[in-house]
Amino acid sequence: MKIIFEKSVWFTVISTLCLVVVTLFAVIGCDKSETPQKDTLRGSKWKLVGIGSLDKIDLQELEPKDCEKCYTLTFDTDNTFQTFSSTNNLQGIYKANYSTQTIQIVDFGGTKINEFGGGNLYVEPFWGKAIQSFSLQADELRLYYDKNKKYLLFKSLE
């Protein structure tokens, strides 16, 4: 009878250890403390924070700053996007490769009312189809241009 009791204790100890290990893996695997990363631009809305450069620390904020609609960028659920500069409604078609984080503006157009403030600085990378790559985090989007030396920095509106 003693042997049966030792096997039961041994079995209980092993079972308990396995249960603890599986529980730890489940808790660690389900940790939501990190900010989730978006995997697509589709259906997202953004507001420009400023224009950055890899050789400068400060961001250049564009005027007008008090314009809610200015410098917004919306990616539709297909491969089209809409944006608004300081005065113009603009739209385009893009192709994005999420594994290489490259992006290509395939087509771009819109109204051409004279820009003011920083409007020209904002639209130049779009009109010139110069945007080449991007980085996408949960609440931040960077569109790189000028051989990836400059970028438009956006914050999420969602």
Image (tube, rainbow, N blue to C red):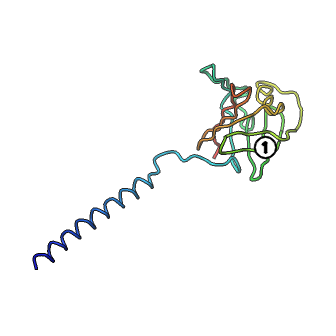
Q: Where does residue 57 sit, x and y in percent of width and height?
A: 59, 21
Rendered-image quadrant of the N terminus: bottom left
What kind of residue is marked 1?
Answer: Tyr
Q: Which residue is mark 1?
A: 94
Residue at the image position 89 percent from the left and 31 percent from the top: 113
Residue 24 picture quarter: bottom left
Q: Nearer the viewer, residue 69 or 109?
A: 109
Count the labels in the image. 1
Q: Is 15 located above or below residue 130 in the figure?
A: below
Q: Where does residue 95 sit, x and y in percent of width and height?
A: 77, 44
Q: Residue furthest front?
A: 3
* 22 lies left or right of 138: left
* 147 lies left or right of 111: left
Q: Nearer the viewer, residue 78 or 47?
A: 78
Q: Residues within 10 Å of mark 1 (few under 14, many from 20)?
A: some
* 55 lies left or right of 131: left
Residue at the image position 83 percent from the left and 41 percent from the top: 106
Q: Nearer the viewer, residue 34 or 8?
A: 8
Q: Where does residue 52 sit, x and y in percent of width and height?
A: 66, 25
User: Tag 1's secondary structure?
Assistant: strand
Residue at the image position 65 percent from the left and 43 percent from the top: 157
